Amino acid sequence: MLLANELPGFGPVLPYDIVKAAGSAGLLTALTHEILRSAVAGCEKWRNAGWDGVVSVNLPLDVVLQPGAVDAMAAIVHEGGLGPGSVMFELTEDQLYDSSSDALNALARLRLAGFGLALDDVGQRQSGLLQLVNLPVTEIKIDLEILHQARAWGKAKNIFGSLADIGRRLGVSVVAEGVETQEDLQLVRANGVEYVQGFLVSGKRPIDEFLAVLGTRNEIDAKASVPDWSTG
């Protein structure tokens, strides 16, 4: 689920800027809850249309560290008619750099509540691999820059393959970010990665347009016949 906005006379506002402004105004928790409600509503729409799957939501670490955060988010999901297993919360390596015991305990509570937990942009920091030892993640997303460099650089191909292998050995799902060409897809498949994210599959879309694409799958299947795929 992507956050987007456009101001008259200014044009599109980047998600990073929206989140930063919300944090400065003390509204980060409220914004996160509203995004979660929208994500749950969207997930319920495609469930009603006969499609299965989970919805991914970026989760600021500051939000989950608040007292009662996990219970509040679980209540939002249940009010929307879904279970926690339908939601995958994503956190980046940067957020979890030198994670405190409080952060690790909060993430453990998320998992105990039944939510999925993805580590985003894996490969940006060497520390991310060390974090995988302690973090209760169910999914890793390989940073798109690694895949893009792997198009022409043998060492990057080996790094990509190693990260994919680490994910499999840990028993977690692996997502390749930044899949834009058939060559990218071939590299991803050659390394046994099941899930992809990128413009080859789909760009960002409003939920109703996304449902229309799901209804036909022709547009996506013509470009990439991927049995399991995600957008975001």
Image: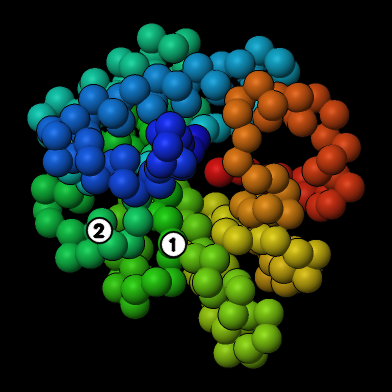
Q: Which residue is mark 2?
A: 96
In the image, taking residue 150 as reference, residue 8 lies left or right, namely left
Q: Amino acid at mark 1?
A: Asp
Comes first in the chain, label 1 or label 2: 2
Depth order, front residue of 151/225: 151
Quadrant hosting residue 19: top left
Q: Residue at x 61, y 16 (%)?
A: 45
Colouring convention used in this rendered image of the protein? rainbow
Quadrant hosting residue 203: top right
Q: Residues within 10 Å of mark 1 (few under 14, many from 20)?
A: many
In the image, taking residue 132 as reference, residue 22 lies left or right, namely left
Is residue 59 shown above or below 162? above
Instruction: Tell me the distance, in whole angstroms, between the alpha carbons under discs 1 and 2.
Output: 12 Å
Is residue 171 shown above or below 88? below
Q: Is residue 182 visible to the viewer in this orientation of the structure?
A: yes
Give the mark count.
2
Q: Amino acid at mark 2?
A: Leu
> In terms of secondary structure, where does tag 2 sit?
loop
Residue 119 at x, y percent in the picture: 40, 55
Q: Which residue is mark 1?
A: 121
In the image, taking residue 200 as reference, residue 154 lies left or right, namely left
Q: Residue at x 40, y 46 (%)?
A: 14
> In terms of secondary structure, where does tag 1 sit?
strand
Q: Is residue 90 visible to the viewer in this orientation of the structure?
A: no
For the C terminus, the image quarter is top right
Residue 176 at x, y percent in the picture: 59, 60
In the image, taking residue 31 as reference, residue 85 lies left or right, namely right
Residue 23 at x, y percent in the picture: 18, 40
Residues tagged 1 and 2 counted as in contact (Cβ below 8 A): no
